[in-house]
Structure formats: C-alpha cells, structure tokens
Image: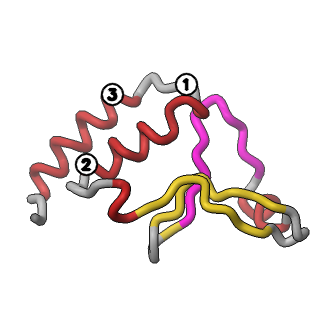
Amino acid sequence: MRLSWNKIRVRAKSFADDWSDAAYEKGETQSFYNDLFYVFGKSRRSVATYEEAVKKLDNRQGFIDLFALHETLTAHLFAAAKPKPRHARAKK
C-alpha cells in the first residue's frame, strides 16, 4: 500500500524527533534504518540488507553498512563522527 505524502510527513517528523539525540552509532544503526524505512511504509528486509560484504579497491575485505537493493549505498555516521571528504573516501 502506498502512503500519502501527509502520512509520510507525519512519520518523518516523528522519526526526526525520536532520533534527534542519537549518539551511539554501533548500537543504534539497525534500529535507525528500520525506523527510517517505516517512514515510507517499507520493511527494511524488503528493500535492504545490513553489513553487505564487499572487496575494497585495495583487495581487502570490507562491509557496506546498508545496501538498499538496486538503490544506494550508505555509510552510517552520527553527528559526533568526523567523516573524511567524499573524494578521500572514494580513493581508499
């Protein structure tokens, strides 16, 4: 069932309020994404997998935090994290 934009907006506001003070990345990542997909009326299991194994450009093993099937790759960082500039991460 497709959600109305109004329902998505209400859920998004609630999601933002619930997660505004999140600080523990490792312990909250999966809950965060489950709640995010709920905003759009989707179960995470129907559209994404956690910790997808990948081979890095330097041939080492790595993991994608969340792989949304046929959609996007994500790296989950909380506000306290200081990510490298995007171009620096892409070269690693």
Q: Are marks 2 and 1 in contact (CB under 8 Å)?
A: no
- CA gap, disc 1 to disc 3? 12 Å
Magenta span: chief secondary structure: loop
- The amino acid pointed to by label 2 is Val
Name the residue rendered at 26%, 57% in the picture. 42
Element on which disc 3 rests = helix
For residue 37, side relative to residue 32 (left or right) = left
For residue 34, side relative to residue 51 (left or right) = left
Q: Are marks 1 and 3 in contact (CB under 8 Å)?
A: no
Which residue is denoted by mark 2 in the rendering?
Answer: 39
Residue 42 inside the magenta-drawn segment: no
Circle 3 Cα neighbour tier, 10 Å, few/some/many (<14 / 14–19 / ≥20): few
Expressed as whole percent of the image width and height from the top left, the position of residue 20 reads 41, 28
Name the residue rendered at 37%, 65% in the picture. 47
User: Residue 23 shows which numbered tag?
Assistant: 1
Q: Which residues are magenta?
A: 73-84
- CA gap, disc 2 to disc 1? 20 Å
- The amino acid pointed to by label 3 is Asp
Sequence-first tag of 1 and 3 = 3
Name the residue rendered at 75%, 54% in the picture. 85
Element on which disc 1 rests = loop
Q: Quadrant of residue 52?
A: bottom right
- The amino acid pointed to by label 1 is Ala
Sequence-first tag of 2 and 1 = 1
